Image (cartoon, helix red, strand yellow):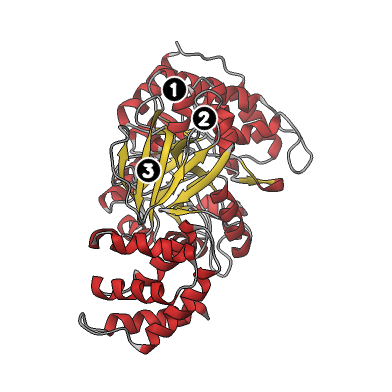
Amino acid sequence: MRKTILAFLITVLVTVSVSAQLPEQIKEGLKNLTVKVDKLTDASTIQKEILSFISAAPNEDLKKKALVFIQENSKSAHTKEVLARLLKGSDSVVTNKNYIVLKNANIIDAISDTSKKGSVFIEGDKITAIDYTNSMQIPEVAAIYDLEGKYIIPGLIDAHVHITHGTLKDAQEHLQTALKKGVTGVRDMGGDGRMLTLLKKNTMIGEDVGPDVFFSTIIAGPEFFENDPRPKEVAKGATAGKVPWQTAITHDSDLRQVVAEAKGLGATAIKVYLNVDKDLFRKVAAEAKRQRLKVWSHAVVPPTKAIDITNGGSEVMSHAASMVQYEFIKGDLKSRHAFKSQEELKAYRQKSQNLNWDKNSAEVKRLFNAMKANNSILDATMFVYTLGLEPSENGKKVDSTRYKIGVKAVKIAYDMGVKIGAGSDHMISKDNIINIHREIELLTLAGLSNIDAIKAATIINAEGLGEEKNIGTIEKGKLANLVVLNTNPLENIESTKDIKFVIKRGKIVE
């Protein structure tokens, strides 16, 4: 109801000419606003309420008249003090809205490798300035947060989530929890495109509270959609493999149409998953890039090995524990659906896991040198492998061999200069635990420095999304997606969980 009244009053304001007096409808609204703010005592809150209302006025004359009207009708000393400051300011100051200054913080910008004390100026949804000299004047209308002793990092991005395997309500609640725990962006790696399109829009405009959603469509061979039950779970009401968010392809497919439908849905990328040979992979990757979509994939896409995936154009390759060992297998790789039984599949995988390799192996050097040359990012997904180190949610234990292989692969790749991204592949666990923080910690256990683990979850993941000009670092002109921490993550990486508050697109998350 309040939104409806406000919308009506804004409409009236917009239709009033520059020279007109305040109409009676506006006066009534301002009287109600005055009664509301007179009950408040916090100057910052009073100021926000007033500026939020008058920001819709079409010109400075009406804004000032509205401020004077509130001042004349107010009976609160707190409100009158705020109005005196607002009226004292210049025209440009009065028009500022949603202005926040984070003062005296230790800024970890994810550009340099250290923190530096300074203040971050935010107007609307953007960072407008960063002051390291304490010389910039703070506008009187700004909401000021003194963060002495606190630390600011860019908003975290979980680069591997699956958020649509439940209901829409489940997804909305999980995303809201993730945002409060510091996640301002997620990369969904294959889900219900109908739901993802809605979540992408709603989280961007603030209708849903949550991180910004970027998602891929699933591209695979027909065998995957015929034999795997998971695609059917996110294609209810349609045929798996025959919808824009999951499409079966062969060498006879119209790849231009396939990619165009994914783009029309709102996808950021294609994700090539299974049963795609190296020639077809190269073709669909090239078409995706021609239509300006990103190319994501598993590190191996049986029958195609990781070396051919990176050389074929994959920009982000997922799963560190399932890549290097397959470089040593002769010929094409077998997919999970090529075996007559689970025992045969397990034996095939066990054989590859038992292979001996290290940083000096020719196949290892060839793979990671190619990934570095191609600027392919390794989405490590270390968290899911730790489910083998303790009982998982179904009470069963998983062999921890994959975790050990993942650690070895990440360390070698990192030492050789491959970019490492942070993705949980399991965004939220029981008790609303957000797992990207554990993923960041595991990357440090695999050899990354604390700052590089933070970069893995910020600027490296932003690059994987193609959003590095907008998010991922604390810089002037970028979106104000920030996490304020109570303690220093450069000293203790677990401090990424020690959150004071989060800012998403310039708004403090309540």
Horizontal placement of 232 versus 256: left or right?
A: right
Q: Secondary structure at mark 1?
A: helix
Q: Are marks 2 and 3 in contact (CB under 8 Å)?
A: no
Q: Nearer the viewer, residue 122 or 182?
A: 122
Judged from this view, the residue extending furthest toward the top is 360
Dot 1 or dot 2: first in sequence order is: 2
Rounded to the nearest whole Å, what is the CA distance between mark 2 and mark 3?
20 Å
Contact? badges 3 and 1 (CB < 8 Å): no
Residue of label 3: 281
Compared with residue 95, is residue 2 higher up or lower down, i.e. above or below? below
Can you identify the residue that label 2 sits on? 320
Q: Nearer the viewer, residue 291 or 119?
A: 119
Q: Which residue, given by chain and number where applicable, does mark 1 sit on?
A: 413
> Which tag is nearer the camera, tag 2 or tag 3?
2
Specify the amino acid type for callout 2: Ala
User: Where is residue 18 drawn, in percent x and y?
Assistant: 21, 80
Q: Position of residue 84 (x, y in %)?
A: 36, 63
